[in-house]
Amino acid sequence: MDIEGKKIVVTGAASGIGRALARRFQAEGAAQIVLTDVNQNGLDEVAREIGADAKVANMGDEGDVVNFIQYAEERLGQIDLLCNNAGISVAGGPEVSTDDWQNIWQVNVMAHVWATRAALPAMLARGEGYLLHTASAAGLLSQIGSAPYAVTKHAAVAFAEWLAITYGDQGLKVSALCPQAVRTAMTAGHEDGVASIDGMMEPEVLCDAVIETLNKESFLVLPHPEVATYIQRKAGDYDRWLGGMRRLQTQYGQPEWP
């Protein structure tokens, strides 16, 4: 996909990866962009900067997501590229409260389902459309210190895979963005954590990989190329890979049951 002239939607656009994507799409010549975030002030600032339409929405609420997609379609006429980007993180494991598990599941997974459900019929009717799902290298590997993040990002990748398999022959293109550590509000204070073992990437640099992958219409967007090697090692010897991850966990701190 060539971004020039396209009509694009970005969720989680007030900061971090979403903001960087919105700016880059505008610089690449997108015809129109519609943004959303739960952060009104940040959203308005980005929208003014790039001349986009914007609507506040909570991606953890199905009604908000559906209403936003309807708003975007009204403003754009059609959605060429839908970036399901909004996401959150919760530290911990089985002890994390059910409410927190449910919240991260809704934002990191169900928001992708709801937005896609709302936008997909028009894409299939046209015989074309593109979905970019922001997941994480954690969705291909795992996440030391956060079971909810690892589980939900695995699910986001799985949903993107299923969409690519099921609708790929009907004109739908799908990509999954799977970076390691990116300098955002989510990673603030964790610059020396395990996720940044291969370096903390700036969101603007990540966008280079996104544009390159969209141009190729490939599935995986890997801003950190090392992730491809880690995937191969995991598939080649799962037990050895698990042992290596346990050593990383020991290095960066063993979690304790509260």
Image: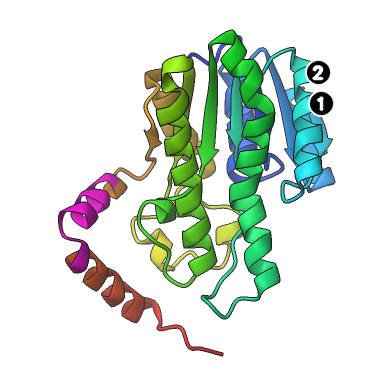
Given residues 189 and 145, the one toward you in this image is 145
Q: Position of residue 146 (x, y in %)?
A: 50, 69
Q: Are marks 1 and 2 in contact (CB under 8 Å)?
A: yes
Q: Position of residue 143 (x, y in %)?
A: 43, 64
**Could you tell me the amino acid type at mark 2?**
Glu
Residue drawn at 67 percent across, 12 percent down? 31
Q: Quick check: 227 above or below 204?
A: below
Q: Is residue 258 above or below residue 107?
A: below
* Circle on res. 71: 1
At mark 1, the secondary structure is helix
Q: As shown in the figure, which amino acid type bears the numbered disc 1?
A: Tyr
Seen in the picture, residue 176 relative to 237 is either above or below; the reply is above
Left or right: where does residue 206 sit relative to residue 185? left
Q: Which residue is mark 2?
A: 74
The boundaries of the magenta stretch are 228-239
Q: Is residue 175 left or right of residue 247?
A: right
SS assignment at label 2: helix
**Residue 208 visible in the current orientation:** no
Specify the quadrant that holds the C terminus. bottom right
> Looking at the image, which residue is at 46% across and 40% down?
177
